[in-house]
Image (cartoon, rainbow, N blue to C red):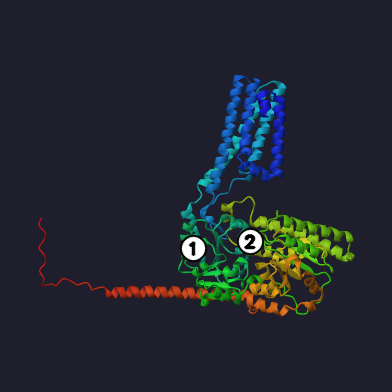
Amino acid sequence: MAGTAVTGVGGVFVGAGVVGVGGDLVLQRSAPGLMGRLGRLHVGETLRFELRCVLLLLLLGRMHVTGPVGLASAMALVLCLLGGQALHAAICTLIGRRRRLAVAARHIDLRRLGISDRPPRRLTEWPGLRMLAYEVAALGGLGATLVTGDARWVVAGLTAAAGGCAVTVLALLPYLVGALRLPGPTRVLGAVNAWLVRHRPETVLYFSGPRTSAYQVGMWLETVAALRAPALVIVRERHLLEVLAPTALPVLCVPDGTHLRRLDLGSVRVALYPANVGENIHLLRIPTMQHVFLDHGDGHGDGESAAGVDPYSKVYDQVWVAGRAGRQRYAEAAVGVEDADIVEVGRPQLDGLQVQEEDRAPIPLPTVLYAPGPTSLTAEGETLVRRLLESEPPVRVLYRPHPATDRRSAAHRRIVALIGAANERRAGQGTDEPEEAGALRAEAARCRAELTRRIAALHARLRPAYADEAMLTRDSAAPDPAAVAEAGELGEQWHRAHWAASPPWLHQVVEADTPALHSCFDQADLLIGDLSGVVADFIATLKPYALIDAAGVGAAEFRRQHTVARAAYPLGPEATGLDDLIRLLFEPDRDTLRAARHELRAYLLGPTAPPAIQRFNEAVDALAAKGEALIRLRELQTIREGAEGALDEPPATAPCPCTPSAPPPAK
């Protein structure tokens, strides 16, 4: 386009422009990552649009088909188009900023604030497509001018483009007025405080962290929702609201620490912290709460070395751990946390896991779950998977990398390729599955597809795609326990259908959030992992598990160094010991560590009775009662100190009647 604009070859210019518009359109749909990188290099869609407009004016000046008046009109229209596009972008930015409330909420009635609707997506999104439409109108007018020799066509095309831009700007103005009328922080905080006074939550689940750590708070939502007293969730980052799992709990997002200090949280007696982060200090300052660090809330399990204990933990009133292992870890760390301030509450999230029976029968085709951590996926993992896929007798492999694993790593890609090739070989060999079983499997696959559609529809109903943060705050005024229960039930049905539709002789790579980790636990007969919270959770099933001893220190030393390895079958370098490990799946009598797994489960996770969820509820109730008693004691002390201060003051003396009064002042 630049070359033909300089030389004045209009026909080639139009053809090049059409190719450019088509290429832009294709890349926006097929390579959004490339378009994003171009934007970061300051060669985004807006700059490309402006350059094409300038080249069009240059071409018109070279061709002399419009005359001075036509060229001046074209220049004026192009300036209007560019100005309108800049104004449109500025209005969209201003609306977006004004619609970010001081406090965002879910399931809290803030309808009295009068929050307006956001602009339709066709007015604010897809700016590249709108600019391409303007370019098509201008190129169409130019082409007609070249064919007919009439300059009015190119002016008409530019008029249509500028007019379309003006229409979008005018359509945005009512939404801009609505955004400017949105309530400020004072009104929003006032409405939130009024709701807090009415509902008086007694427990708050508080979390701050990046988007990738949202699972740390998500794993506690169901547990906190089961508390007997009213509860509240407070998160500090807006992106956490976008990825938070469906819950009936009221949720507040308070990004600004000054706004958090203005919240009326006087009814809260217990504050639960799943993560040890610096933002916790903003809530720790409130003396009327009992502050609890959920030490096993980060998912890394109890019982590892004392080096993993954060000295910051001593700022909390209590530290809740799963079992005796956590208590001992704090005693060995000696970071200032008193033993009396440690409470063993178990792991409520593990109450529903399937536990292996005492006398299990041999399994014809056992399932091995390989779940490496985010940083331990190396060549050792590739060797391990290859040997599992080639083992005799055969096993089925479930490969579930950690969510933080780099999917572009060479080791991960090679493992996925190995599993794909193994599945092709097994599919080619055929199976002896009865026809009835195949029909049931096909029906399960259809059921899974239908459940996937229903789950997507339910999530779209709970969180509409067109709604922004302000609209979701307004429209989710009341929790919908039925919808949350439906989401949970649909999830359970989906998992059942997924495993029923999956051929039991084919391996699987689980890279997404579904199937869930605990669902994979129920399918597995053996876990191979490393020193992570995955293994600590798997111990609750009492199934055999193996840990990779990459350093090759030996079984005895490996178990001495790591608590979670006490009941594990260590695998040395190059998967040494894997053959014996697979053999025990077919010969259950060779499993000599079942008693050790019982002991380790009790040590790490506490007793199985009463259930962990019951112990968690009792711990919350006891701490809330303690906090209430301390508040009453402080109030009594304040009253007593006030009364003593009043008694210590000297009594006021009246003037003696016999004392002559002072003479009046001189005038």
Query: Residue 87 at x, y = what percent?
Result: 55, 37
Query: Residue 237 at x, y = what percent?
Result: 56, 56
Q: Is residue 557 left or right of residue 496?
A: left
Q: Quadrant of residue 342?
A: bottom right
Q: Relative to the observer, which residue lies in front, 238 or 36?
A: 36
Tell which circle, 1 or 2, labels the residue nearer the N-terminal end: 2
Q: Amino acid at mark 1?
A: Ile
Location of residue 16 with respect to 533 vertically, above or below: above
Q: Nearer the viewer, mark 1 or mark 2?
A: 1
Query: Residue 666 at x, y = what percent?
Result: 9, 57
For mark 2, give the secondary structure.
loop
Q: CA distance from mark 1 to mark 2?
A: 25 Å
Q: Relative to the observer, which residue lies in front, 468 or 171?
A: 468
- Total number of numbered discs in the rendering: 2
Residue topped by disc 2: 245
Q: Quadrant of residue 3?
A: top right
Residue topped by disc 1: 281
Asked whether residue 134 appears in the rendered view, the answer is yes
Q: Is residue 40 left or right of residue 644?
A: right
For mark 1, give the secondary structure.
helix
